[in-house]
Amino acid sequence: EAGVAQSPRYKIIEKRQSVAFWCNPISGHATLYWYQQILGQGPKLLIQFQNNGVVDDSQLPKDRFSAERLKGVDSTLKIQPAKLEDSAVYLCASSPTADTQYFGPGTRLTVL
Amino acid sequence: QKEVEQNSGPLSVPEGAIASLNCTYSDRGSQSFFWYRQYSGKSPELIMFIYSNGDKEDGRFTAQLNKASQYVSLLIRDSQPSDSATYLCAGTDSWGKLQFGAGTQVVVTP
């Protein structure tokens, strides 16, 4: 079974630029999550999708972050404009139920 | 703010010994608890989960949950150098939303 796919794996941008991340969950997993993990901290949930609907986006900075999951499969997370404090690893995870979550390899973002 | 707290470590453990990791949580509504292992530069991978009070064993790993004390622990028996990693504790609510701790770094010394 293929795992969660993410791209790009690394991205370096300057502040105020825009960036987008892509995630393809495990086939059949209805729930998809985006997390932000800052160095030395645990992952923080940004947004949770159930199929193509948003379940929780309470910790998503909506003035600069947006996410969508069209057709209930792939998802993209966008930051516009980026700030220095957005430097982190962005993790996508998927799960078949409300229990076990499987993480992708992550995208390491550096904002200069 | 609902929180999951862990000692950051590092926890130094001799090879072959038992590593004991602790986690406390503030949300009494938390139903399920998970332990993830994260190697440096890698994404978290699930070790085990526990829902009920008591112990749950899986190979060299034992998770312990005490909901009255809001306490979760993980024991790693016969620790190996390959167990050197950061261990993340997480609690979930009924929507499946995970609240992670900051992780405990474990270093197994030969």
Image (cartoon, helix red, strand yellow):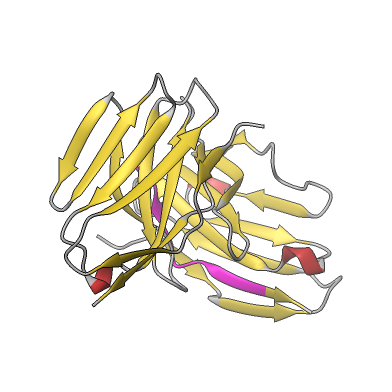
Q: Who's the residue at 52% across and 46% down the image? A: B101
Residue range in magenta is: A99-109
Q: Nearer the viewer, residue B103 or A67?
A: B103
- Is residue B41 found left or right of B46 in the rendered image? right
The percent position of residue B94, horizontal first and vertical second, equals 46, 24
Residue farthest left in this picture: B59
Q: Looking at the image, how many numbered discs can be counted on the residues?
A: 0
Position of residue B17 relative to residue B54, above or below, is below
Is A108 magenta? The answer is yes
Q: Quadrant of residue B90?
A: top left
Most extreme residue toward the right, as rendered? A16
Query: Is residue B7 rendered to the left or right of residue A15?
Result: left
Q: Quadrant of the C terminus of chain A?
A: bottom right
Q: Quadrant of the N terminus of chain A?
A: bottom left
Q: Position of residue A80 (x, y in %)?
A: 80, 62
Residue A71 on image: x %, y %: 52, 46
Front-lying residue, B94 or B74: B74
Visible in this render: residue A76?
yes
Q: Residue at x 66, y 51 (%)?
A: A67
- At 84% from the left and 64% from the top, the residue drawn is A81
Can you see residue B100?
A: no
Q: Of B34 and A34, which appears nearest the observer?
A: B34
Residue A17 magenta = no
Q: B18 or B35, which lies in front? A: B18
* Residue A95 horizontal side relative to residue A65, left or right: left
Q: What residue is rendered at 20% in x and 36% in y?
A: B56
Percent position of residue A92, x then y: 50, 56
